[in-house]
Amino acid sequence: MLLVALSGTTVSPQDRSCLNRTLSLVAADRDGNLITDLHPSDFEATIHHEPVQILSITPDTRPHRIVIVLDLSGSMGTQERVVFIPALLLARTRIPNSSMALLAFDEKIIAQADFSDGQPAIVEKLIKLRQESPAQRRTALFDTVVAALRLLPSPSSADVLYVISDGADNVSHTRFEQLRSQVTASGVRLFASLMQGQRHPNRSLTPEEENGPWDLGQLANLSGGAVDTPLARGLPTKPKENEAFLEGMREFYRTMVQNDQMQIQLPNAFYKTTAWELKLSKSANISPKNVSLFYRKSLEPCSK
């Protein structure tokens, strides 16, 4: 109070509420295994070089909603059948306290299943799409991600957009900067399986395809999600390879829904989107070299 009086400013009730944030947090070891039983003392955080107080870390028990966003456009090249593998694996996985929806697209949305339809309906639609001849159409990835956000009334960090794509976009009306703003403002976390590796053997990548992985990685990083490349080495052919592939995908899915909620208190109000840093503290019983932290790297501004 003395500091406030000396500065000649006051902190409004709105600013006080803005200082307290609840965010999603996932910690995983180098093998992708989730680390549980985390405590505030395990971390330290800063924003504008000032310390951020970590008040609590608790398991996120809210219902999780996952929208599968599946790219079936011509830019997927020879992956038109392989691209269904991550989507079908997730749709066939029973995840407690979770529901799923589907948007499959090329230059427009070509198939949709809502949360009320259930996972069997998603599997049925995916199998039907897989049996159809692929069309070599353009890619409206950004517009489709915006449409996926609209499937999530009152979005929060318990919600997930799972994008299966090469990240290229060449027809959307939505610009990447607009998409980034909408994703971060929603609080939803974006995860992506990048379909790379064997595609496009006979031609060079377009600028959109070159930028695609970076764009998806930026959205995932800012929102607290993650990116994997499940088939970068091709399809598994041996039993042990297949077992390792399936377990890796299951760990990736668990990252989407077995997160913690971290409550923090910021030192000051701010009025533009601002980056902050979270890292393991020196007193943590975990080596920083062995841990990856998934949390949203930018915070939305306080309302003026």
Image (cartoon, rainbow, N blue to C red):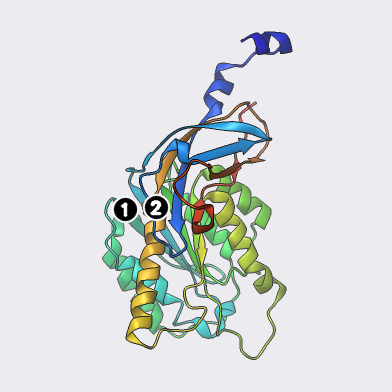
**Label 1 SS:** strand
Q: Nearer the viewer, mark 1 or mark 2?
A: 2
Image position, residue 94 (x, y; %)? 27, 62
Image position, residue 22 (x, y; %)? 47, 36
Q: What residue is shown with label 2? A: 35
Viewer-proximal residue, 55 or 147? 55
Residue 268, quarter of the rendered image:
top right
Residue 267 sits above or below residue 186 on the image: above
Which residue shows up at 55% across the image and 78% down it? 76
**Label 2 SS:** loop
Callout 2, which amino acid?
A: Ile
Q: Is residue 151 visible?
A: no
Work out whether mark 1 precedes mark 2 in sequence or the reverse, and give the earlier one.
2
Image position, residue 276 (x, y; %)? 62, 41
- Rounded to the nearest whole Å, what is the CA distance between mark 1 and mark 2? 21 Å
Callout 1, which amino acid?
A: Ser
Which residue shows up at 61% across the image and 10% down it? 1
Residue 16 sits above or below residue 29 on the image: above
Viewer-proximal residue, 82 or 244? 244
